[in-house]
Amino acid sequence: MKDKISKKKYDKLYKKVRNSSFLGTVLSFSLLMILFVGIMVFNSIFFLEYVFESKFAEEHRRLSMVSDMRDHHGDPLEMEEFYKENDISFYVRDDQGTTLMQRGDDTCTFEGGVINMTEEQEHFLVYLDEEENYFYVKGNHLKPKWDELVSWILEHWKDDESIKELKLPFWISMEHEDKGEVFVGKAYLTLNVHDMILVAEIGAVILILAVFVLILTVVNIITGIHKMNNVIRLYHHDPVTNGYNWTWYQKSGDKRIRGVFTKKSNWASVNLMLRNYRSYCVCHSVESGEALLSRIYEVLEERTEKKELCAHVTSSNFALLLKYEDEDHLKMRLHEIMNELSKVEERHNLSFRAGIALIPGVVSGSEEASDRKKLQIKDIYNNACAAGSMVKDTVNSGLYVFDDKLLEEQKWRDIVHEKRNGALTNEEYKVYYQPKYNPKDDTLRGAEALIRWESPEYGFITPGRFIPIFESDGFITEIDHYMLKHVARDQKTWLSEGFQCVPVSVNVSRAHFSERDLAEQIRDIVDAEGCPHELIEIELTESAFFDDKDTMVETIKRLKTYGFVVSMDDFGAGYSSLNSLKDMPLDVLKLDAEFFRGEFDGDRGEVVVSEAIKLAKSLKMRTVAEGVEDKKQVDFLAEQGCDMIQGFYYAKPMPKDEYESRMNGQNNLA
Ligand code: C2E
Ligand code: MG
Ligand code: MG
């Protein structure tokens, strides 16, 4: 199976497809936008810095020239004239900051910082101007006050005189190291409206492009969400009912039962199953079966309220998650739902079964609340299914609530499944013998082999706790072979040791009767141990007689030709098997223990037993009465001509060595 993928991988793949339809586009567009805006902003800053630096360099050169001229020009009067004409302002200060000379404006704040010019690779001390200040110093940079600049542009951009200038003043400090003086000159960053509009245009272009990419991103997010929803819908879609599927139920169910608010409510996970769905499909086609499931889903969907869940799981199974106030109310609601569902198909009265697992609400912060976080809806739904399987198979719809007893039963069933093979290999199953006595003279006439499980872990286990499990899972065939082999072996040993052996009956489950060579299998097992056939009796339970009758008659006949005694166990229990007696050439009739329970004294009970014995006699069958516990019953049975009694009055099932002492030479009761 090359294409098989694990559940984990499947979930991963789903997330990948889901996210790629959303995150993929959103991420790529967001990255593109960030990249684009980043590049634009970086280029603009670079460009603006370049403009500023070149203007700064120009001003620096101009003021250096003034400073040089002041140093080298001989005539102070001419210089004064020059300062005035060219509107030059400066300070000359000594090392201590004392002003030695000042010309023009004296508006320097002497507050600022060192800035470096990348082009010149030089550091300059720059001060702000106190009157018209469009700058501030941040770190090593003069930063323009954009709001003031923008308001200036807005004020002037309509002006015809487009050359109108904005002079942004600041002061550059230059040291004369040889003289120990500092020259601080007033510089201007001159911007005209054109410059400013250019800056504004760059900003606007960046903005427009950013908005464009943003719109693209938003469009992509919306289509991404749409695609993602489609993927999610597909993943959670059930093609049969057009509703939700099991995956959705699990995901949403886990959220509901663990949710901060929802975990306070009582929830019930319900497995609702339409019975006989397969036979409906056989009679009407799978397509009509699926249409029926779809209609059932619609009703369920209508009947579920806000926050409650409904999904189609497999075949005719539906999973519900319902809120409830009290258990009786929930049961009533489910009965109503099943009642409505039973009428979904006009021509058929549909029957449903519901298994319920309750999840009582928890108080926030309590211990139960932290346990609730670990709960998984699939486990709870599984409990609901287990509860569903307990509903009796009748024509009427029914329900069952998962309880501790069922939990214990399921756990025990699991242990039995786990341990059964090891127990067989380790011979933990023991043969117990329950003697059968002749009530007339109390002599030992036979015995029944009954299994017991002596488990080193779980102690002594009676057959009622594991035989029904083995019957349902088919392991009973192994057990019956095992018992037959051990009984045959014991009989052979006792024979060779000189015991006066009596026939021992072995139970053979109905599960065997589908095997056409059953008689040969029994013969071969007994022969392998070297045990004479007449010492083995085969007990068939009454329920076995409802299987394939012809095969059964054939098997009984063959067993008899091989020399085995064949008996009918539990005659009278459950349905009457009088009819089986007609066709089955049986040797022994074992009257069920139920005949001797309760008020046996009553005439009716006695009449039935005596008539059953008479019937057996006329069919040339011997009778064994099972479950006889008191003397009165023994006397009555002896009187009626019952051949053997197997009951606690004489003996309980006992281990091999105890049974040996019963046989020990004299078969009479000690
Ligand atoms: P069963 O074959 O009808 O066996 C008779 C049961 O009645 C035995 O129960 C026995 O202990 C019980 N019994 C006999 N006399 C009395 C009595 O006077 N009073 C009461 N209260 N009970 C009495 P056990 O041994 O528990 O077996 C129960 C059932 O389990 C058997 O019913 C049989 O159907 C099944 N079983 C036991 N061993 C085997 C086996 O090796 N193979 C198969 N297929 N089934 C077995
Ligand atoms: Mg039996
Ligand atoms: Mg019986």
Image (tube, grey):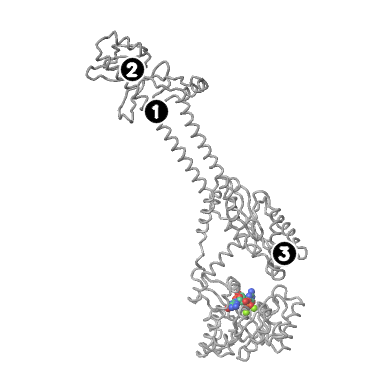
State how far apart marks 3 and 1 are (Cα): 87 Å
The image quarter in which residue 170 lies = top left
For discs 3 and 1, the disc positioned in front in the rendered view: 1
Q: Is residue 431 left or right of residue 67?
A: right
Give whichever of discs 3 and 1 has the lower sequence position.
1
Vertical placement of residue 390 versus 129, above or below: below
State how far apart marks 1 and 2 are (Cα): 21 Å
* Residue located beneath label 3 in the image: 351
For discs 3 and 2, the disc positioned in front in the rendered view: 2
Local secondary structure at mark 3: loop
- Amino acid type at circle 3 is Ser
- Residue at horizontal 52 percent and vertical 45 percent from the top: 26
Local secondary structure at mark 2: strand
* Residue located beneath label 1 in the image: 51
- Amino acid type at circle 1 is Val
Residue 31: x and y in percent read 47, 43
> Which quadrant of the figure shows ligand 3?
bottom right
248 or 17, which lies in front? 17
Asked if the residue at label 3 sits under 8 Å from ligand 1, the reply is no
Give whichever of discs 3 and 2 has the lower sequence position.
2
* Residue located beneath label 2 in the image: 185
